[in-house]
């Protein structure tokens, strides 16, 4: 399983450890991923996603999973999240 957020696409970054003597060695910056269960109001289901802590705050700020997915760009989302987004858009279009 790759270390990538399913909602924002945030992944592993690389950089340097720099010592006091200015020696540089390569290192990896890992995203803060959490296994969370988010509820979709439109579909009435729970979905277990692997998201970063930053994405979790963004979901809460935008007003839930449905609002976050509708406002987000499909290129950032994982395949599973894209499928979920399409289902939510379809369901909200039927309701309207």
Image (tube, rainbow, N blue to C red):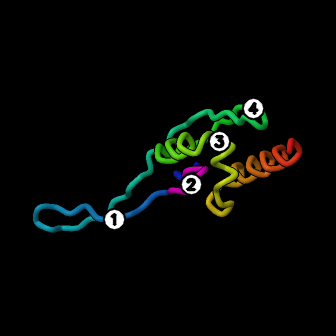
Q: CA distance from mark 2 to mark 4?
A: 21 Å
The answer to whether the residues at label 2 and label 4 have Cβ atoms under 8 Å apart is no
SS for tag 4?
strand
At x 81%, y 47%, the residue is 87
The answer to whether the residues at label 2 and label 1 have Cβ atoms under 8 Å apart is no
At x 64%, y 56%, the residue is 72
Label located before the other in sequence (2 or 3): 2
Where, by quadrant of the figure, is residue 94 drawn? Answer: top right
At x 11%, y 61%, the residue is 20
Choose mark 3 or mark 1, whichever is in front.
3
| Most distant residue in the front direction | 96
The answer to whether the residues at label 1 and label 4 have Cβ atoms under 8 Å apart is no
Label located before the other in sequence (2 or 4): 2
Q: CA distance from mark 1 to mark 4?
A: 40 Å
Q: What is the span of residues highlighted in magenta in the rendered image?
A: 5-10
Q: CA distance from mark 3 to mark 1?
A: 32 Å
The residue under label 3 is 65
Q: Residues within 10 Å of mark 2 (few under 14, many from 20)?
A: many
């Amino acid at each position: 399983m790759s270390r990538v957020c399913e909602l924002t696409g945030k992944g592993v970054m690389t950089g340097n450890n720099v010592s006091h003597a200015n020696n540089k060695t390569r290192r990896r910056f890992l995203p803060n991923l959490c296994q969370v269960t988010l509820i979709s109001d439109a579909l009435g289901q729970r979905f277990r996603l692997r998201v970063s802590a930053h994405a979790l705050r963004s979901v809460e700020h935008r007003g839930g999973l449905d609002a976050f997915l509708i406002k987000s760009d499909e290129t950032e989302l994982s395949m599973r999240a894209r499928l979920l987004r399409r289902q939510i858009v379809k369901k909200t279009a039927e309701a309207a």
